[in-house]
Amino acid sequence: MKKKTKILSLLIVLVLICCSGVTVNAASNANAKAHAALKRQLKADKQKYYQYSSSKMRYVYVDINGDHIDELITEPGYGYLTQAIYSYKNRTVKTVAAVGQGTFTKYYPKHKVIYIKNSGHMGYLCDYYKQSKTGVYKLVAQVGKDYGSRSYDYKPIKTTYYIGNKKTSKAKYSQYIKKMLKGEKGKNFSSLKWKRY
């Protein structure tokens, strides 16, 4: 009986090892396909935004949504498109998030959230939280900071909080963010291993 139990246990372990190997291999194959498709997007962004420049565009591959397949982040650097995030799914590359007049600040893979701090211009800055539920990151909460004609070094004249598009109190806003992130610590976009192309 003990011998049968040992054999059965050994078989279960072997099956688990084989299955995990297949899963890792499938994920790495999917990632290789994603990189090949996203490389074409990288070239397209370079040609579109840097065709008259000798500078190199910053970019990075990183898994921001926790699905083990990298996304591509490019940095065209234009006011209307400072940075863009692309993903590859169902044999298609699509833009899943973009920011103008600012940069991506933090990402929360477990809860599929992106945080953008101080995006804006002309005396008005916003902090955004965007979340992905269908593959595209959509605005879920924001803080609007009105500086008027003052320097950004000072406190804003007025601060307005929103959940979705509805105004709310600071307390309700903070509670919403806390509930959404559930204690997950964000990872900084600035600490990624950016490259130039």
Image (tube, grey):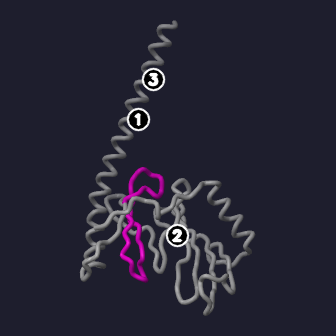
Marks 1 and 2 in Cβ contact (< 8 Å): no
The type of residue carrying mark 3 is Ile
Q: Residues within 10 Å of mark 1 (few under 14, many from 20)?
A: few
Q: Residue farthest to the front?
A: 153
Q: Nearer the viewer, residue 89 or 157?
A: 157
Q: Residues within 10 Å of mark 3 (few under 14, many from 20)?
A: few
For mark 3, what is the residue? 12
Residue 84: quarter of image: bottom left
In percent of width and height, residue 21 lies at: 37, 35
For mark 2, what is the residue? 138
Q: In the image, which residues are magenta?
A: 61-87
Name which residue lies at 52% across and 7% down.
Answer: 2
For mark 1, what is the residue? 20
Secondary element under disc 3, as helix, strand or loop, is helix
Residue 25: quarter of image: top left
Name which residue lies at 39% across and 59% down.
Answer: 193
Give me the disc on residue 186.
none
The type of residue carrying mark 2 is Lys
Secondary element under disc 1, as helix, strand or loop, is helix
* Chain-order first, disc 1 or disc 3: 3
In percent of width and height, residue 113 lies at: 54, 62
**Which quarter of the rendered picture does the C terminus lie within?**
bottom left
Q: Nearer the viewer, residue 70 or 93?
A: 70
Q: Between marks 2 and 3, how big is the CA–CA gap?
A: 43 Å
